[in-house]
Image (cartoon, coloured by chain):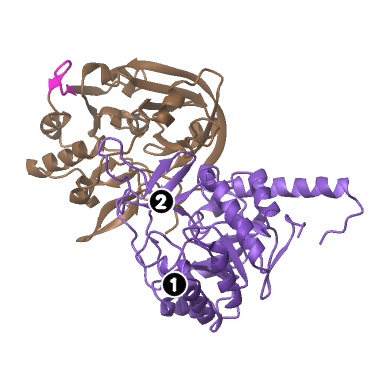
Amino acid sequence: MTADLSRARLEVGEVLVVERLGGGLLELVARLPQLAASATPGSFAQLRCGAGTTPLLRRPFSVAWTQDDTCGFIFEAVGVGTRILSALRPGDPLDSLGPLGHGFTLTSEGPAVCVSGGLGCAPFPLLIGELRRRGVEDIIVLNGARTAARLYPAERFAHPGLPVTVAEATDDGTRGHHGPVTELLTTALRAHPSALYACGPNPMLNAVMSTLTASGMELPSVLEASLEAPMGCGFGTCLGCALPMLDGERSVWRLCCTDGPVMPMRDVDWEGLSALPGADVA
Amino acid sequence: MSAHAGAVDLGRGLVLPNAVGLASGTAGYGFELEQLIDINRIGALYTKGTTVAMREGNPPPRVAETGGGMLNSIGLQNPGIDVVATVYAPRWRGWSVRVIVNIAGGSVEEYVHCARVLDPVAEVAGIELNISCPNIAHGLDFGRDPAAAARLVAAVRAVTERCVVVKLSPNVTDIAAIARAVEDAGADAVSAVNTYVGRKIHRTSGKPVLPLGTGGLSGPAILPLALAAVAAVSAAVSIPVIGVGGIIDAASALDFIVSGASAVQVGTATFVNPRTALEVLDGLEMHEGRRAMRRPSDTMS
């Protein structure tokens, strides 16, 4: 089946600010009217990093939030591409291709739980805003990071006036629960969420699924994770971003860019995903 | 050949409306790019390499970025020739871009089977033989040995009247010898070059990033290499040469034309900017217009 790319546009926007949130977390805000008007929760944009040929490929970023004609992107400067983005100044051009990808299934029934690990916070502000618009009152964010400085600020998960419950966890205990974010899951599950959305490193997502399964509780009807993979094009032609997914009992390759990045957690081949090597960041 | 933005006759009745094509493996079967660009302005679409049976492709990671380029090891993921002929081809009806189906296989019989399946399909404008995929076992054998390449081309030639383009591997000692062999065996045109075998090391683990160790290098990094190959091939054959490898704009496409190519394919650059092929076409047309104005008495040949 061919991906629906009808909303995707090439667009050169303008950087408004690259804000340092602490702990290396960055929020890039850019005026990208077409992307802002058409991005849906869980969709992403392929951003060009500089105008040269190294780095050659665009980098995929979740559209973290939109407001009027602007979009926010949350990232860390970990490689050559993100270092270039981190050095952008207000007024610099930003070349975007998007929105791309298959996003979250939107529910209008609460409670909804969002589980974030590290940069996994990226797709959630836009998702939370949309869930609120649909009348979901009870939204719980479980936000985990290695240390307090690297937690996306709780108040940014929703626009002012749209409060959400944010429970935090840090690996080093510098804020919130001392331990992995998945340890907060058992409490959140007592609210019997109708939807659970997760985004973060693969081991964390795997732990979310194991915790859910081990809890013996009925799984939320919407149970989805936003995944990532090394990506070439972002629009389904290079076939580079294969992820192991279950088709019945069989593991098959699906494309992160067009079949995902949001995938039903029930259909992920968790064993296959765990066996993949770590990201190649240069 | 100076009318490089104009029509290109590849032989056997296949005339491309212009010199710019989308390279195999970077445009799928056209259905994604159709949504992003005006695909019918482009001269030719060379499809993803297609095999007799469906292939699921290689385990990830399948792509790795390198300086000015990227390595891929997709492993010829494709739905199989029957799906292409019966499900995809009808969707090309009405397209003006010429769809040239790239076929690959592990034996002469597999290529011949694919060519036979495609031969009666009206929407298929031609066949490109991928004798050079570095990412599947035995895929390179035909591309490395002039005699084996010639046997393959002759066998395909015997079952189809369609235009047959042979995509040459650069991972050989003497690419001109392979080009001559496939010309003698009945190829209508050659495209040069496929990707270069390359390797990237994961700096923390010290292991290759790609699971098979190596992959195919593409992108602007290979432009000078591809130009040298095209110059060598052009000097060796009289059939049309289609230049491919590292084109990012009209200037780099012109580099191929002046090196002897009659047409070009835009590959990896489409990933970065899906409009690249259109921009190359615009640039070539402008260049042609300027030449015509400079030398009004010239007749275009």
Q: How many numbered discs, if any?
A: 2
The percent position of residue B36, horizontal first and vertical second, equals 55, 48
Mark 1 Cα shell of 10 Å, populated few (<14), some (14-19), many (≥20): many
In the rendered image, the vertical position of residue B70 relative to residue B18, given as above or below: above
Q: Which quarter of the picture shows residue A61? A: top left
Q: Residue at x 66, y 76 (%)?
A: B12
Amino acid type at image mark 1: Ile
Amino acid type at image mark 2: Asn
Which residue matches tag 1?
B81
Tell me the shade of chain A: brown
Which residue matches tag 2?
B72
**Residue in the foreground of this view, choosing between A103 and A21:** A21
- The kind of secondary structure the magenta stretch mainly shows is loop
Q: Are marks 1 and 2 on the same chain?
A: yes
Magenta-highlighted residues: A169-178
Whether residue B96 is visible to the viewer of this picture, yes or no, is no
In the rendered image, the vertical position of residue A259 relative to residue B56, given as above or below: above
Q: Residue at x 50, y 81 (%)?
A: B155
Which numbered tag is attached to residue B27?
none
The percent position of residue B299, horizontal first and vertical second, equals 87, 59
The percent position of residue B170, horizontal first and vertical second, equals 50, 58
Residue lying at the far front in this picture: please name it. Answer: B173
Q: Chain of mark 1?
A: B
- In the shown orientation, is residue B105 left or right of residue B292? left
- In the shown orientation, is residue B30 left or right of residue A133? right
**Residue in the foreground of this view, choosing between A47 and A152:** A47
Whether residue B78 is visible to the viewer of this picture, yes or no, is yes
Which chain has been coloured purple in this picture?
A: B
What element does badge 1 sit on? Answer: helix
